[in-house]
Amino acid sequence: MIGDATSAGDDSLRRGVVSRLSGQVGWPGVRHAGDAMRFPRTPDAVTDRINTRTYRARRVVRYYGSTSGWLDTGERVAMEFACSLGAGPPLLDIGVGGGRTVPLLQAISAEYVGIDYVPEMIEVARERFPGVDLCVMDARQLDFPDASFGFAAFTFNGLDSVSEQGRSIILSEVRRVLRPGGVFVFSALNHHGAVDRVLLTPPKPDSWQRPRRLARWSMQQLQTVMNLQRMRRLVREEADASIRPVRAHAGGLIGRYTSLARQCDELVRHGFKVAACLDPQGMPADPGGNHSTFAHFHYVARTDS
């Protein structure tokens, strides 16, 4: 998964979408109602072992430490819409990784805290942004008092890096640390998306004339096959959710994929009101539409005032 920077030419589109979202009440069809790291012995343990091993790999840390800008237009529109709802400081940036979101979200709130459960990621982020409040912390156990933040964000589908039980705990923890009327913006992998169903890819046409590129492609495919074999017993498929390898990093991550409707229901069950669901282009997602072309969705949710 590679983030795409948003061009200035998208400004008029974003303004129009935000304007339409600002007039939207709720979401159609949804009910409204320290640096040491120790993982508990829970169903998350296996998922944590797999995903943290990948996240801590040097090439992966380098990748996240080099990314910048918005993941896609949808991420930017979601943040702008959250601001239009009155999301205020302080801001909690969950899963900050190598620091991609630090300058983006500091522009929204000078009162900023970034956390990640991978120490190597925080180390890189601190090097990139010295003096910023960044710390190692697991989102399943947020070390903050109740109602500490006005705005929370969990970008780049980080919520899907833990088990279903872990996701539920994170949603409860975010709800706890948000103030009344607080806003939560996050992205989540789309169960009905077709992109991550294909993990093995053919080589680029000119690879046969470039031996080094062909060798890299061959090693990546081999690594993907090994990862698929290692995770095969963890794969689960339901009508509206699944647990399976993620295409990124040679299939080295296992993620939870959720349908749009199920994710909205989960938010409601955890005490949020769904304010908006956006596709990667920043357009409101149609609950009854064909979602096969979208790898993920962006969600904007609120707590009761």
Image (cartoon, grey):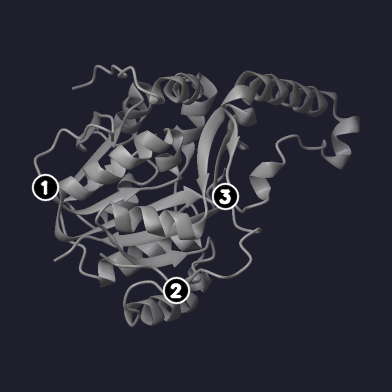
For the point 65% across and 59% down, the residue is 293
Dot 1 amino acid type: Ser
Q: Residues within 10 Å of mark 2 (few under 14, many from 20)?
A: many
Q: In front: mark 3 or mark 1?
A: 3
Q: Is residue 6 above or below residue 59?
A: below
Using the image as rendered, state which of residue 201 and residue 111 is in the foreground: 201
Percent across and percent down for residue 35 are 23, 20
Name the kind of residue labelled 2 in the image. Answer: Arg
**Label at residue 184:** none
Asked which secondary structure carries label 1, the reply is loop
- In the rendered image, the residue lying farthest to the right is 209
Q: Quadrant of residue 89?
A: bottom left
Quadrant (top left/top right/bottom left/bottom right) for the C terminus:
bottom left
Residue 273, given in percent of the width and then of the height, sits at 28, 64
Q: Which residue is mark 2?
A: 14
Q: Quadrant of the N terminus?
A: top right
Q: How many marks?
A: 3
Name which residue lies at 38% across and 75% down.
18
The residue tagged 1 is 148
Residue identified by numbered label 3: 191
Q: Is residue 120 visible?
A: yes
Q: Report the residue at 35% width, 34% height from top.
A: 166
Three-letter amino acid code at the position of disc 3: His
Which label's residue is closer to the chain start, 3 or 1? 1
Residue 14 drawn at (x, y percent): 44, 73
